[in-house]
Amino acid sequence: MNVEAIDHLVLTVKDIDVTCSFYARVLGMNVTTFHGSRKALSFGVQKINLHPYGKEFDPKAQAPTPGSADLCFVTSVPIPDVTKHLASCGVNLLEGPVHRTGSRGSMVSVYFRDPDGNLIEVSKYGEALRRYRCFFGPHDYEDDHNHGGDQCQSRKDTSRIEQDE
């Protein structure tokens, strides 16, 4: 046997409509309906099927649970634009931008949670971390960002930085 790709995966969620709205608004995914009223999120050539918690479709995972996934999505959008978009959607970053290693090599990633608490990583390949000036002076995004009890915008407040050119 030789596995070539992932066709789809399944998320068990508390509220299908809330999940569809979040992934469409924040990540630009398309909401599709199949087999009558089942919902999926589609993007590229992949999709995420959605199962309502407590009413999962068979066969299913042994212990389907909302908030148990850790997913990484790849974007072509520059990470500074991603962070601005997330802020405009009211999404709080948990971490990033930070360097990571994905299946194709080096990438820059940001992390946040979806409405069910799943960890979402959005990454861009081929993008170097840039230095930024924040209210507290120049430093890299991946620095600790602890400035005497206050935190730099890369974690919370995107209005306090400018990119060094």
Image (cartoon, helix red, strand yellow):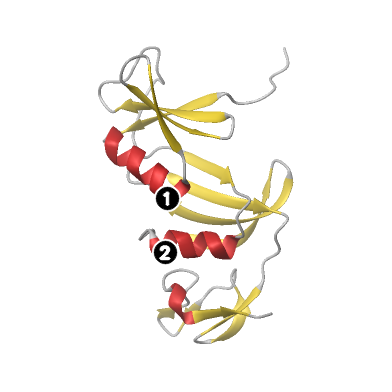
Toward which corner of the image does residue 99 lie, by quadrant? bottom right
Where is residue 134? Give x, y as percent.
53, 82
Q: Amino acid at mark 1?
A: Val
Return the residue at label 2: 87
Q: CA distance from mark 1 to mark 2?
A: 10 Å
Q: Does 140 sit left or right of 121 as displayed?
A: right
Q: Residue 65 shows which numbered tag? A: none
Q: Residue at x 47, y 45 (%)?
A: 28
Q: Does 145 sit left or right of 23 as displayed?
A: right
Q: Residues within 10 Å of mark 2 (few under 14, many from 20)?
A: some
Return the residue at label 1: 26
Query: From what the image shows, is residue 69 above or below residue 58?
Result: below
Query: From what the image shows, is residue 78 above or below residue 57?
Result: below
Say if residue 93 shows up in the picture. Answer: no
Toward which corner of the image does residue 149 lie, by quadrant? bottom left
Where is residue 156? Give x, y as percent.
42, 70
Q: Residues within 10 Å of mark 1 (few under 14, many from 20)?
A: some
**Viewer-closest of 103 and 165:** 165
SS of the residue at dot 2? helix
SS of the residue at dot 1? helix
* Image quarter in which the N terminus is found: top right
Q: Residue at x 70, y 40 (%)?
A: 103
Where is residue 152? Give x, y as percent.
48, 77
Query: From what the image shows, is residue 137 above or below residue 154?
Result: below
Say if residue 129 shows up in the picture. Answer: yes
* Image quarter in which the C terminus is found: bottom right
Where is residue 123? Give x, y as percent.
60, 51
Q: Amino acid at mark 2?
A: Ala
